[in-house]
Image (cartoon, coloured by chain):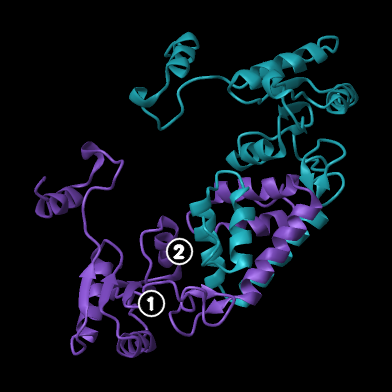
Chain colours: A cyan, B purple
Amino acid sequence: MSSASLPTSVYKLIKLWSRLPGVGEKTARRMVFFLLKQDPEWVAEFIRTVKQVKDDTHHCSECGNITDIEPCSICRDKMRNRKIMCVVESDEDCISIEQAGIFNGLYHVLGGQVSPLDEQDIPEESIEKLKERVVDLKIEEIILATAPRIEGDLTAFAIQEALKSIPVKISRLSYGLPVGGSIGYADRVTLHMAMESRKEMQ
Amino acid sequence: MSSASLPTSVYKLIKLWSRLPGVGEKTARRMVFFLLKQDPEWVAEFIRTVKQVKDDTHHCSECGNITDIEPCSICRDKMRNRKIMCVVESDEDCISIEQAGIFNGLYHVLGGQVSPLDEQDIPEESIEKLKERVVDLKIEEIILATAPRIEGDLTAFAIQEALKSIPVKISRLSYGLPVGGSIGYADRVTLHMAMESRKEMQ
């Protein structure tokens, strides 16, 4: 975009905002113009909260989840099933599963995935911490909730390998058709997986 | 989303961010988690720029466009064609046209549209200012670039009515198929408009 007719700060904020995930320059522009229309109080609160989020949060020293207390609210919750642990790649994935309300055990956030093409790997200390926790907490089942793609498969295999000397059941989320989707829109690989994992009806 | 497992500030920022145009709670969450991963310096600059945008800009007293100088860079540009004026609903629309590089005249930002269902109207002072500018600047052509929908039509008619006592040519952007689209995806109304406005090939 030409910056000629835009105030410098507006142009700069559009550029900064475009760095956010899934935001192109047009979307960034819409957001900046939205901010311009808000009350100064709203913008001040937005600024305050961005600062707070950055200043007041850290990763839980136990599970790696984002938190403002230590350990996090999930790790300290005695009502949860402390014998089952869901391993995710990121704190964002953890929130998705929490929001779905489908799991009541503990989490372990890896903070990375195995991705040879991007030269990325699971942080070593995160794997060590997982092994330590599985033993100390006497975990009975590990559920691998890594991404449903190649990197997620490699990550799952790496965790399986790391835990092979520890007697714990390891499972992984199933592949298949997304609920509410349609056969016509499903991709070939998903259809193949759904066919392979087909279940007999009762 | 349950806030139980999220730090308060994170939950609050997701809620604030969801208010932005085109952002649902999932997108807001992705953005907040993106921020959490950034350097403190990047976040500090982001905060500074949001504040600057709000503090340093205002609407040009001449055309109503967003600016940090008075009058704005477009109004003061002597190289532009000062006999032709493009009337838009918002400063955002003005930036879109500027970015396209298809117009070299002046602008007038209405700051509203006629929308009976939402009980909205063009601000009266904006119409008065437009009439005053058309006369004072001896504008020869007004191009109405209002939205291609009912509210934009009503807005265009309102401006036409307001200017009827002033001898100035008034035109409006054409309706038709969007370039790069396909016939199959065009909606019925657009196809109808494109048919009505068809042009003889040379």
- The numbered mark, 2 or 1, whose residue comes first in the sequence reads 2
Expressed as whole percent of the image width and height from the top left, the position of residue B1 reads 60, 50
Tell me the number on the disc at residue A39.
none
Callout 2: helix, strand or loop? Answer: helix
- Confirm whether circles 2 and 1 share one chain: yes
Mark 2 in CB contact with mark 1 (< 8 angstroms): no
Callout 1: helix, strand or loop? Answer: strand
Q: How many marks?
A: 2
Where does the C terminus of chain A fall, quadrant-wise? top left
Residue A48: name its quadrant.
bottom right
Identify the residue shown where x is 65% and y is 21%.
A151
Mark 1 Cα within 10 Å, few/some/many (few <14, many 20+)?
Answer: many
Expressed as whole percent of the image width and height from the top left, the position of residue B107 reads 39, 74
Mark 2 Cα within 10 Å, few/some/many (few <14, many 20+)?
Answer: some
Foreground of the two, B157 or B169: B169
Tell me the number on the disc at residue B108.
1
* Amino acid residing under circle 2: Ile
Report, in whole angstroms, how far the alpha carbon at label 2 lies from the one at label 1. 12 Å
* Amino acid residing under circle 1: His
Question: In the picture provided, is A153 more to the left or to the right than A81?
Answer: left
Expressed as whole percent of the image width and height from the top left, the position of residue B30 reads 62, 45
Question: Residue tagged by mark 2?
Answer: B95
Identify the residue shown where x is 78% and y is 20%.
A140
Parent chain of label 1: B
Q: Is residue B104 above or below residue B30?
A: below
| Residue A149 seen in the current view | yes
Q: Is residue B199 above or below residue A151?
A: below
